[in-house]
């Protein structure tokens, strides 16, 4: 049985370097026999605001219902995104807010501060592009986007273990450097990690 992988491309520009990274992972995984589905957020049409929070239900658009089905199907979830202002693009944040809902991704326990993780049994990989070296982002800023996505989103819902790969700096990178980044991500895809 082949591994089922969902690659979520979280950059709002489908011509970004994140697109090439997502493709490198996807193609290498498929070459090993994995089943891979792509979810390109730039191609979806949905309201990114959870307008009423959890007080009132906001009906999901068909593309978000399909995204939830893809998450249920997947054994391994890969998220590729840029780091902007130490966080994720608004489109990606809106996608996560709208899709990872109570009753789907987690369930609060009545009368308790604890919750049940409803996406257990899946592993994750977060690939983030930066305009600084990854080591600097970790040492100087503590990797805020990585920590939030890994611990407070993926692992909160049960997607664990989740590994993080930082790719950068992108802005001043040469073609040779970008080719090396793509090879690095392809190696991860070939191992389904």
Image: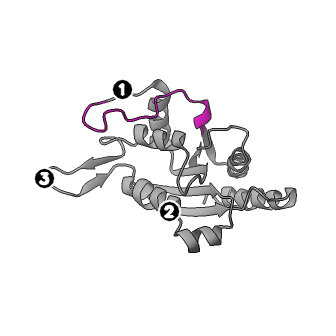
- Residue lying at the far bottom in this picture: please name it: 139
Judge whether residue 4 can be spotted in this image: yes
Mark 1 or 2: in front is 2
Residue indicated by mark 3: 111
SS for dot 3: loop
Residue 83 x, y percent position in the rendering: 59, 54
Residue shown at 70% from the left, 58% from the top: 185
- Within the image, what quadrant is residue 112 found in? bottom left
Tag of residue 144:
2
Residue 158 relative to residue 91: left or right: left
Q: Position of residue 20 (x, y in %)?
A: 74, 47
* Pointer 1 or 3: first along the chain: 1
Residues in magenta?
A: 39-57
Which residue lies at the image location 26% right of the left edge and 54% below the top edge? Answer: 115
Separation of marks 1 and 3 at Cα, in angstroms? 27 Å
Most frequent secondary structure within the magenta stretch: loop
Instruction: Give the image's coloring scheme.
Output: one colour
Residue 94: assigned label: none
């Amino acid at each position: 049985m082949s591994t089922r992988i969902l690659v979520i491309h979280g950059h709002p520009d489908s011509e970004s370097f994140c697109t090439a990274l997502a493709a490198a992972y996807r193609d290498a995984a498929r070459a090993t026999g994995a089943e891979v589905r792509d979810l390109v957020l730039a191609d979806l049409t949905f309201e990114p605001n959870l307008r009423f929070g959890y007080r009132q239900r906001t009906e999901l658009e068909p593309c978000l219902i399909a995204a939830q089905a893809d998450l249920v199907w997947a054994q391994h979830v890969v998220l590729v995104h840029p780091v902007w202002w130490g966080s994720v693009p608004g489109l990606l944040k809106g996608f996560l807010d709208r899709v990872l809902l109570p009753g789907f991704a987690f369930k609060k326990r009545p009368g308790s501060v604890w919750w049940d993780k409803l996406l257990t049994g899946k592993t994750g990989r977060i690939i983030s592009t930066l305009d600084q070296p990854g080591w600097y982002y970790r040492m100087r800023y503590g990797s805020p986007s990585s920590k939030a996505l890994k611990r407070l989103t993926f692992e909160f819902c049960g997607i664990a273990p989740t590994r993080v790969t930082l790719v950068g700096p992108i802005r001043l990178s040469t073609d040779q450097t970008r080719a090396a980044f793509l090879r690095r991500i392809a190696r991860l895809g070939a191992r389904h990690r």
